Image: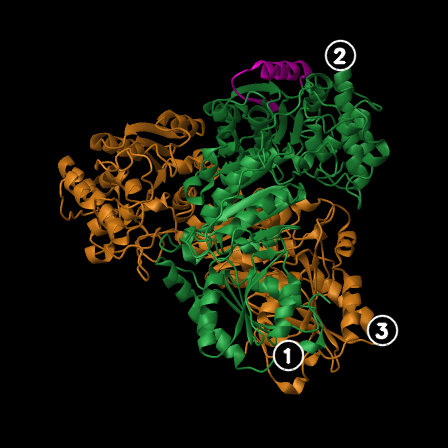
Chain colours: A orange, B green
Amino acid sequence: MINEEIHQLAQRLRIDSIRAAAAANSGHPTSSMSAADLMAVLMASHLRYDYDDPKNPNNDHLIFSKGHASPLVYAMFVAAGVVTDEELLTFRQFGSRLQGHPTPLLPWVDVATGSLGQGMPIAAGIALCARELDRLPYRVWTLCGDSEMAEGSIWEAVEHAGKEGLNNLVTIVDVNRLGQRGETMHGWNLSSYAKRAEASGWNAIEIDGHDIEAIDRAYTEAEATSDRPTMIVARTIKGYGASETANVEGKHGQPLKDPEKAIHELGDVGPVHVDVAKPESAGQPHRFDGDPSVPLPSYEVGGDAVPTRKAFGEGLAALMRRRGDVVALDGEVGNSTHLEEVLKHTPERYFELYIAEQMMMAEAVGFQVRNWTPFASTFAAFLSRAYDFVRMAVISQAKLCINGSHAGVSIGEDGPSQMALEDLAEFRALGGSVVLYPSDPNQTVKLVQQMAEHDGISYLRSTRSGMPTLYGPDEEFTIGGSRVVRESEDDQVTLIGAGVTLHEALKAADTLAADGINARVIDLYSVKPLDVDTLAAASRATGGRFVVAEDHWVEGGIGEAVLTAFADADERPRVVQLAVHEIPGSGKGAELLHAAGIDADAIVAAGKRLAGLGPQIASAAAGASAGD
Amino acid sequence: MINEEIHQLAQRLRIDSIRAAAAANSGHPTSSMSAADLMAVLMASHLRYDYDDPKNPNNDHLIFSKGHASPLVYAMFVAAGVVTDEELLTFRQFGSRLQGHPTPLLPWVDVATGSLGQGMPIAAGIALCARELDRLPYRVWTLCGDSEMAEGSIWEAVEHAGKEGLNNLVTIVDVNRLGQRGETMHGWNLSSYAKRAEASGWNAIEIDGHDIEAIDRAYTEAEATSDRPTMIVARTIKGYGASETANVEGKHGQPLKDPEKAIHELGDVGPVHVDVAKPESAGQPHRFDGDPSVPLPSYEVGGDAVPTRKAFGEGLAALMRRRGDVVALDGEVGNSTHLEEVLKHTPERYFELYIAEQMMMAEAVGFQVRNWTPFASTFAAFLSRAYDFVRMAVISQAKLCINGSHAGVSIGEDGPSQMALEDLAEFRALGGSVVLYPSDPNQTVKLVQQMAEHDGISYLRSTRSGMPTLYGPDEEFTIGGSRVVRESEDDQVTLIGAGVTLHEALKAADTLAADGINARVIDLYSVKPLDVDTLAAASRATGGRFVVAEDHWVEGGIGEAVLTAFADADERPRVVQLAVHEIPGSGKGAELLHAAGIDADAIVAAGKRLAGLGPQIASAAAGASAGD
């Protein structure tokens, strides 16, 4: 396209942004209008993307980190010919794919954005993937707003991409000066961004973001820059092209009052079609060989105490040898989480993100965009640093396997800053998530394999200290399962644990048995989804007397999961919830379990109390079950 | 002290770090040894701190952002004469104040650290507090590890402090090259840190961190720098001074194997006492006038629909006029959360942190260290970005008031990226937290006042769209309360809602009544703590038939809170949990409430089903209550 045609395209992108927002009576046309020239030049002359084949592995990627500029994204899809004008005008309506912020319901959208500061780190992850995993020459473009440059996650990504020298990454910053509620921290001070990018090893280019030739030159320079990523810092005008909105404060996130006038000012440009260049390369992504015959690690029942974190590392290492699509991401704690085990055989699929949990999670999301199966791992407590990234990954429909180690007070001496006591609540409260909490190394290994099979977000909680091996290496464990580890014909109470508390429950069952109280013990290793049938059978068998012990705050944890399973059932067990209620300190793990009231002693006391009560539900013959 | 004495002090700090870790058989002596010279010079010649009067408002602050160097902190307290050698050797033992990472159980510690990248942003917050609120000349020193410089939160703070020109902030980076599992991203490349700090407007000084004169010169330069913060980037050696550990990989987080040999190499230095200079200023912190006669905003029952976010802003604005200690922190969304209301009368206590939620929360924590009462506010969804900071604030025993707006699917068109559906789970799963979710503007105003009275972490969930005003301005609402908004003598079912779902429950009750089913309706605005007595009375009165509707994932939300209240009670209501189960899209709020199955229609259906069942608990005469 010649420049005048590109100008017309940009004007049409603005017009369609205005029209979409007008139809919705909602949305962000002004944030779209500032970036329209930047995107028009990209589409016309630099992007390599087959819109008819969004799965083409050689396509470039374009991530709108400023997801609120969704009218512009959708206008681009119209210009590319894959979204009709009719559909454009369904923007933000119930049932439309054209949601308020982009999501992968649209095949040309890689990830959901709209929480600022996430698209750019994910783009960096995809760019690294191109070089290290796919080994293909596609380029990753990302459009950032200037407001979101205040997010630390952006600068984690800048530092990461700079250090890695990702020459295939181009970050375009749309410096339209105006944030949501007024001027940004830096206004039009372009060098405030450029200097910092340069300090992290980037090529930085400052341009007028409405100068089509300047934009084209900048993209050309970025493509020619072979040793580092490029940040194009573009001075733009919010609401550009319409007198109602251009550089006017208070116009964020609002449809125009007079769209017709604005469209007229923009030249009444009709529909513009752009033939986006298709990628030249016909290469296929690199694939690493897997050897399904590699045995899984196994541990001897009754042998040395093996922490589940160690079994996680060894199980993942085996998985990665068996499957070439699995990759591992570390937050500089791989010697503690045992993620380092994967370095022994598959170092080329191990990625050190240093202590930057947001970037770690973003890179994992980026890798799965390209169909790799990522395992991200750090201390469970520090996953709270990346919670917004996991929240958004749900909306991105991402496949993401996450390990959080050092859960709960049982870690001991390190004290509360290192103890995850909220991670079960965090990971349960994600649509469609899987939450696993094994108590045994063989079980852990099996669950790690299951996570890789699961299409969604799965979380494994692992434990610092060694625990006895309960299960043989041939036993199978599945997502949604549980295990009755002790039962008899005349059980009076059900003790439910997972991870460290399962072992406390088993000790408690011995003590109770010595006092003539038989206890059923359930290993509830799949906290979500829950094995409701096994729980319901136990409830019927033990008169509805449940003790749940968990190394977690009571809120959002295992006890509440069990309660929800029976909430609307005819027969609802009585549940004693043993959980952490006070901020713990340092000490030995056993001391802290005792102080928190979640050790065998506390379980025994609760079990005795419950056993002394009459049946809490009708007899087993009643037959009603949970989930009715 | 002369330099040789300072050297002796540093050696003793190393020796005591080694001794403490040896006694605990745990801990981080090597990360302490690298920074001992830096801290010895600080104590001997630059810090102004009255260890006998840690509440002295003129004391400098010293924040160990690298909290794992706790042996060094504690050794400094020994050298200052406020911790005995005997107590030092209780390090990491159960019941000791000297936990694995520092906490404010020790009066000389401002905040808990140990999750990396947090102490430095909090220090920046305290430094801003000195200038803008306290108006006192104290200085804030913070010691960072080099690994934690990978955290984006550090760079949010660097940018914030640089922009603000915080000349009273000195960040000391202990570049010992070795992280937990190997070399950091930048090793001993000091300029990689210095250049970035300079790009954000800092004075940066690169030094040898074991050269006492160089350290002293750098501190002197920092004190003399009047227009900007200073970052001292110090090249150090991890495990310095002992052949077993000096610059040896694999020594992170471990006691020495041969402490006696190391102590001998360090010169067998005995106890060293240092008289830390007391602050010279005797000034008192600035106080802003409050006028308790300023009226609270009030809203007419049955008047225009007022969103609770608006009432939050107006209620906070009134509170800030009434109380001079209250301050407001924004994440560049104050026009949406209505935090901007405070600008009308108390702009000097409004702080714009831009879109940097971690920095916002860190600054709030810093302000409360200095006895201000902070309200931090953004969209509830984006609070997930700062969850680790809130988690740590619990351990810091912080007083922190947090508002999260735009909760749930009811926000409508913006789509799922902006919808908090996990915030109740997040904020419930914090030890000792308060979680409030008002449904009415007058109620919101009252609860905002209550939050300011509460000594701990309180969270208010506010709603985007307007809702009818239910309560008169004279009604009182308290933390831990609830309100029965509809009841009769023969209620058959209890409908429980909060926020937007309370209004749906009221509509449902009308419909049910038309069908001859009387429903009690409870406004459960205090989600934590819960008004168990009122719930128990309702359970007894309505045959244990409960419907809970919430605009949140089922996990960790209001339904589970209710279930926990009755889990171990003799009589446990049957609870239908209406909550969000699928990832929502865009649409009108009412459409999305309906699609999620949490609107009046769904409540009616559930109420009818429950009413058709027999009593779910024994008759009211049975008398047993929840919490027995």
* Residue A376 appears anywhere in the view: no
Label 3 chain ID: A
Mark 2 surroundings: few (<14), some (14-19) or many (≥20) residues within 10 A = few
Do the residues marked 2 and 3 share a common chain?
A: no
Determine the CA span between mark 1 and mark 3: 24 Å
Q: Secondary structure at mark 3?
A: loop
Dot 1 falls on which chain?
A: A
What quarter of the picture does the C terminus of chain B occupy?
bottom right
Q: Amino acid at mark 2?
A: Ile
The answer to whether the residue labelled 2 contacts the one labelled 1, judged by CB atoms less than 8 Å apart, is: no
Q: Is residue B213 above or below residue B245?
A: above
Q: Residues within 10 Å of mark 1 (few under 14, many from 20)?
A: some
CA neighbours of label 3 inside 10 A, class few (<14), some (14 to 19), many (20+): few
- The mark nearer the N terminus, 1 or 3, is 3
Q: Which mark is residue A515?
A: 3
The magenta segment is B211-235
Q: Which mark is residue A537?
A: 1
Q: How many marks?
A: 3
Residue B2: mark in rendering: 2
Q: Quadrant of the N terminus of chain B?
A: top right
Pinpoint residue A547: horizontal percent, then vertical percent.
Answer: 71, 68
Task: Find the distance from the CA under tag 2 to the CA under tag 3.
Answer: 69 Å
Spot occupied by residue A334 in the image (x, y as percentages of width and height):
60, 46
Q: Is residue B111 left or right of residue A101?
A: right
Label 2 residue SS:
loop
Tell me which amino acid carries mark 3.
Asp
Foreground residue, A491 or A327? A491
Estimate the spatial distance between the alpha carbons at disc 2 and disc 1, rounded to whole Å.
76 Å
Co-location on one chain, circles 1 and 3: yes
Q: Nearer the viewer, mark 2 or mark 1?
A: 1
Looking at numbered disc 1 in the image, what kind of residue is underneath it?
A: Ala
Q: Is residue A458 left or right of residue A507?
A: left
